[in-house]
């Protein structure tokens, strides 16, 4: 008897063999059925909908589990993370709004770079975090930072009146716009370069260079507040708007046209977020500003060092600036640049973005080592003497990581501008 569907085939010949082995490989039917059938009622679409129904969270539902994001996620390198995994966990019962997964993403953007479906963690995470903040599900460390920023205009809780105290530590002129009224360039110094001792070192070095180049600049000092981009990404949209509106108002008062920033997070805020709140300034990172003026600096001292450079996520991937820092380093006498395996577009993250700067305690329960420690190990592997940076979060993060990974004496961390001033033959700390 012939098959009704295909009369040319004898149904007796259609026998499913228990085992089919071809070229040593088992390709039997049962191989494909080695897993249990999906139990579809174990899925929790309502928890996925909760994210995708949140303004900004829509693309969470576009993930088709291709897993391209996993190997590039810096948190996954030291933990169990990445968009695909988060989506899967939410599909199977995790409420992202009160789960630890919500706070581990540093918004580094590496997953978005490779995701074929444009699942955008830079939108999803701040949106869900914003609701979590309203509901009170916030790690304690972050709550303290939000309160400090609200009360003092900086995440460390330092006195706003002392924001320009660092300028007293240098003999070079760092004028306040309050006194000067007008300047070609407003240098938006930001919090860590104003208060953190190693940030201040870099600020003093940059002041030295700006004076040498006769740049007409001024700072806001006590009139400046945190750009607040990291607090925004950590879910405090209201606080961000308050700080942003304050900064924009002050900058408008001085008829500012060009803002130079030391902090790539401030660069992101000024370029991508502040315009929606009325800002119309051109904003430039200090490396972009200085890259073509290096020969004017009279750098004569041969530093004789091997340097590796860490691309800040918010200067590189977020803003596309990979060359200016390298151009600066290449122009310093005696600097030999050696790249880490993960660099430029695929650069690793220091762990400080998206609120991570203040979540090291929280993260220690979820990762095997800090992202900054992983990066320091990568830097040491290049054989470099110096890990060069140009984001104020990184100096302190990496210096701590050099100590905690036992690499003191092997690697030092320096801002590029510190290397520049050293090559000008000057000390870079107080009174330079
Ligand atoms: S790359 Fe995009 S689509 Fe693929 S698993 Fe990751 S988030 Fe999902
Ligand atoms: S933005 Fe960065 S840290 Fe966050 S999930 Fe994507 S790759 Fe991981």
Image: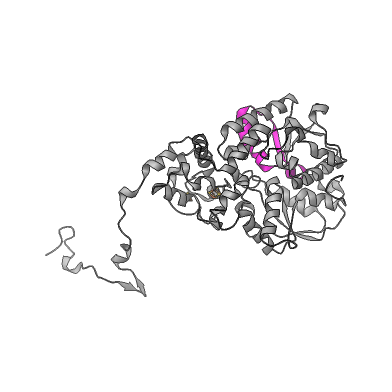
71 over 184 or under it: above or below: below
Towards the viewer: 245 or 104? 104
Where residue 221 appears, as percent x and y from the top left, is: 76, 33
Q: In which quarter of the image is residue 185?
A: top right
Q: Is residue 395 found inside the magenta-colored segment of the image?
A: no
The secondary structure making up most of the magenta span is helix
Q: Is residue 377 left or right of residue 111?
A: right
Q: Which residue lies furthest to the top in this view?
A: 253
How many callouts does the rendering have?
0
Q: Which residue lies furthest to the bottom in this view?
A: 24
Rendered residue at 68%/40% (across/down): 156
Query: How was this image coloured?
Result: one colour
Where residue 266 appears, as percent x and y from the top left, is: 67, 38
Towards the viewer: 73 or 2? 73
Q: Is residue 97 left or right of residue 246?
A: left
Where residue 46 appears, as percent x and y from the top left, is: 37, 41
Q: Is residue 278 found inside the magenta-colored segment of the image?
A: yes
Towards the viewer: 416 or 321? 416
Q: Is residue 339 visible?
A: no
The stretch of residues the image draws in magenta is 263-291
Q: Quadrant of the N terminus?
A: bottom left
Where residue 74 appears, as percent x and y from the top left, is: 57, 54
Q: Quadrant of residue 235?
A: top right
Rendered residue at 71%/60% (across/down): 338
Q: Can residue 148 be seen in this view?
A: yes
């Amino acid at each position: 008897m012939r098959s009704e569907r295909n009369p040319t085939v004898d149904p007796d010949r259609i026998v499913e063999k228990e085992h089919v082995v071809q070229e040593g490989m088992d390709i039997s039917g049962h191989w494909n059925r080695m897993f249990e059938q999906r139990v579809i009622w174990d899925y929790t679409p309502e928890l996925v909908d909760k994210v995708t129904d949140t303004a900004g969270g829509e693309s969470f539902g576009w993930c088709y589990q291709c897993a391209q994001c996993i190997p590039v996620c810096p948190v996954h390198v030291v933990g169990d993370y990445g968009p695909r995994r988060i989506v899967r966990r939410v599909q199977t019962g995790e409420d992202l709004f009160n789960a630890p997964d919500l706070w581990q993403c540093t918004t580094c953007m590496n997953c978005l770079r490779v995701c074929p479906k444009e699942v955008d963690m830079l939108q999803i995470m701040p949106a869900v975090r914003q609701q979590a903040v309203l509901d009170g599900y916030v790690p304690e460390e972050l709550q303290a930072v939000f309160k400090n920023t609200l009360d003092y205009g900086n995440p460390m809780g330092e006195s706003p009146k002392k924001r320009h105290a660092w300028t007293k530590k240098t003999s070079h002129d760092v004028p306040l716009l309050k006194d000067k009224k007008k300047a070609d360039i407003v240098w938006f110094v930001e919090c860590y370069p104003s208060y953190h001792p190693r940030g201040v070192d870099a600020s003093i070095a940059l002041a030295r260079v700006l004076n040498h180049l006769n740049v007409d600049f001024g700072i806001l000092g006590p009139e400046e507040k945190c750009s607040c981009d990291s607090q925004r990404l950590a879910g405090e949209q209201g606080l961000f708007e308050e700080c942003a509106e304050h900064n924009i108002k002050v900058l408008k008062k001085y008829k500012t046209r060009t803002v130079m920033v030391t902090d790539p997070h401030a660069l992101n805020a000024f370029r991508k977020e502040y315009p929606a709140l009325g800002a119309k300034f051109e904003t430039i990172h200090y490396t972009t500003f200085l890259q073509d003026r290096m020969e004017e600096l009279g750098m004569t001292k041969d530093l004789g060092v091997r340097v590796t450079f860490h691309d800040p996520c918010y200067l590189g991937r977020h803003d596309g600036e990979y060359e200016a820092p390298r151009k600066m380093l290449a122009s310093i006498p005696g600097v030999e640049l050696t790249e880490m395996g993960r660099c430029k577009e695929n650069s690793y993250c220091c762990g400080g973005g998206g609120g991570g700067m203040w979540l090291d305690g929280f993260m220690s329960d979820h990762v095997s080592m800090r992202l900054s420690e992983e990066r320091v190990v990568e830097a040491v592997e290049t054989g470099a003497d110096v890990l060069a940076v140009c984001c104020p979060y990184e100096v302190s993060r990496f210096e701590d990581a050099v100590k905690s990974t036992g690499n003191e004496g092997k690697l030092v961390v320096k801002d590029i501008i510190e290397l520049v001033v050293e090559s000008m033959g000057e000390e870079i700390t107080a009174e330079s």
